[in-house]
Amino acid sequence: MAYVRAAAAAFYVSMRLRFISGFAIMGFLIFPLILAAVGLFVLNRPGTTATQWTYGLLGGGLIGYWGIVYLDAGNGIQVERWNGTLEQIFAVPTPLWVIVLGKALGGLVWGMLSFIPTIALAYFGFHALLPRLDPGPFAISFTLLTFSFLAMALSFSPIFAMWRWAFTMVNGFELGTYVLCGFMFPITILPAWLQAVSGLLPPTWGTRALYAATTAEGSHDFAAWWVTTIVLSFVYIGLSVWLFHLVDRRARATGELALV
Amino acid sequence: MTPAIEVRDLRKRYVTHRGVIRRTRSENVALGGISLAIQPGELFGLLGPNGAGKTTATKILTTLLLPDSGSASVLGLDVVRQTSAVRRRIGFVFGGERGLYWRLSGLDNLRYFADLYGIAPDVSRRRIAELLDRLGLTGRERDKVEHYSRGMKQRLHLARGLLNDPEVLFLDEPTIGLDPVGARELRMLIRELADAGKTIFLTTHYMFEADAICDRIAVIKKGSIVAEGTPRSIKQLVEDLGIVEFEAAGVSPERVRTLRQLPGVSSVSVVEHEMNQTVTVHCVRPADVMTQLGVILEGIQLQRVSSRDPTLEDAYVQLVGEGET
């Protein structure tokens, strides 16, 4: 019960800090809108298929959603370190992963707001609507995609805290995921070897299922995609649990928590 | 009686690497085997210059760092293996303004940490109100921390450190950067907490602070304890010494060296000010040194020359060496 309350407190504080942060507002409102606008302008020509419109419609929101979850959870430990609060939250009886989880859940709620401006832009600016939405599979796919985002972000968090070289790649991982997980276009247009890398990332399968739920075209092998998303997400969560233990040992051995 | 804090032969070194192609490794010994025993209810001060190992010792005892060897326990709990149990029963405050969420109110900061400490909501509500009142923050608790003065931030730090009603409180240079009035108020609070039965482990490099409030102190130098006892007993280490102090401008290093070579002189420290220097000479026979000053400092106008009995600060200078205060 104490852990639930601690996670809820971390969630609440992360939401409070976002509401007053101009950068956070840019993250859910402006950046997704810019990306969605570019995509929709490119697609706004004769011959654009329903599937392509769907990518334009949802892609900006997905990018904003992932960007917020990833930067919040992945960057979560670094931000605490910069604030000088990392030692304070590290030395409480609540494990660090509980606090990061609470913050990441805050990121999920905030990230979902990214869909509001992008879908509004598509509707009011381009009169674009999702052609055929299968509500059940769409909702399940979206839930599992959210879970996969959380799993990925949680595993990035200790990596960034531990290795500075990894943190220098922070934007690279964010943008790479857009491409590799097929947020703005199907991964089938990527080279075969890159598709293999995509297959190891849990959001790839959730994204695929999500887009399939919005169109009658192509295959609809939801069960296989959902199971793959769940299995891979749990693998990443297992990895993150191990990495959090490693961070705990390493940070206490090297004294890197107070790094400015 | 079981000590509240017990440290045996504690060692810690930091390893750093430099360069990418030609990678070099360097080691810095932060603690070279210190041992301490602090009794329940004691206000213990660890004094030392910057880099002496005070913060490293504090961080090991607060479970933030792992020692390389040796053992440390707080309230009978091993700080390496029983971290969660230790964390529930201790509080800590590090000096400086960071370590708070500046864009949240003081109250939100305290509520957040109360939840992270697993304190039941009804208990935390009552305790936060008490702490705000005791630390003089009532009425400003809903203001954002960024609008707090430095003294208020430090009092908020102390409130956070006391949220879980800790039996042992670690304070790492808590008055650093505070104005004299704020620092004195904080020292009084710390003394009150010790009088109320809390064990307090305080690090500082302000000698008068340690002299004013600590029951017992240890002086640490380059990772080793060089003296331990009551402030009075530490002062007695230099009671056979006298202090000659003078102010002048343009005292060259050569003349300082000459002063150091005088018979009976144990140390000479120079503090540079904007317009002049304050030179402090620790010696056995102050009168002899004062006689020699005119010769050694020929051509330099002395602004003030005095001789006095040693203070704790003088004992400290003597213990840690010149130029390290």
Image (tube, coloured by chain):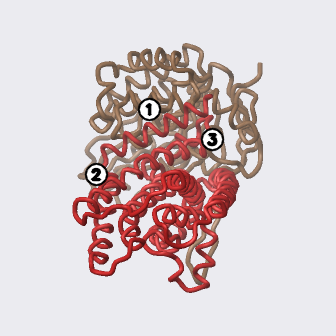
Chain colours: A red, B brown
* Residue A34 horizontal/vertical position (percent): 28, 66
Label 1: which residue? B157
The mark that comes first in sequence, 2 or 3, is 2
Front tag of 2 and 3? 2
Residue A22: mark in rendering: 2
Query: What is the chain letter for disc 3?
Result: A
Please give the name of the residue rendered at 52% of the width and 77% of the height, measured from the top-left corner: A187
Query: What is the chain letter for disc 2?
Result: A
* Residue A202 horizontal/vertical position (percent): 60, 63
Please give the name of the residue rendered at 70% of the width and 55% of the height, measured from the top-left corner: A238
Residue B22 in view, yes or no: yes
Please state which amino acid type lies under the numbered disc 1: His
Helix, strand or loop at mark 3: loop
Q: CA distance from mark 2 to mark 1?
A: 27 Å
Q: Please identify the quarter of the rendering in which residue A36 is found.
A: bottom left
Number of disc labels: 3
Please state which amino acid type lies under the numbered disc 2: Gly
Please give the name of the residue rendered at 30% of the width and 34% of the height, measured from the top-left corner: B144
**Residue A224 versus residue A2 in the image, above or below:** below
- Badge 2 crowding class, 10 Å Cα cut-off, few under 14, some 14 to 19, many 20 or more, is few
Label 3: which residue? A95
- Badge 1 crowding class, 10 Å Cα cut-off, few under 14, some 14 to 19, many 20 or more, is many
Helix, strand or loop at mark 2: helix
Residue B236 in view, yes or no: no
Helix, strand or loop at mark 1: helix
Q: Are marks 2 and 3 on the same chain?
A: yes
* Residue B110 horizontal/vertical position (percent): 44, 29
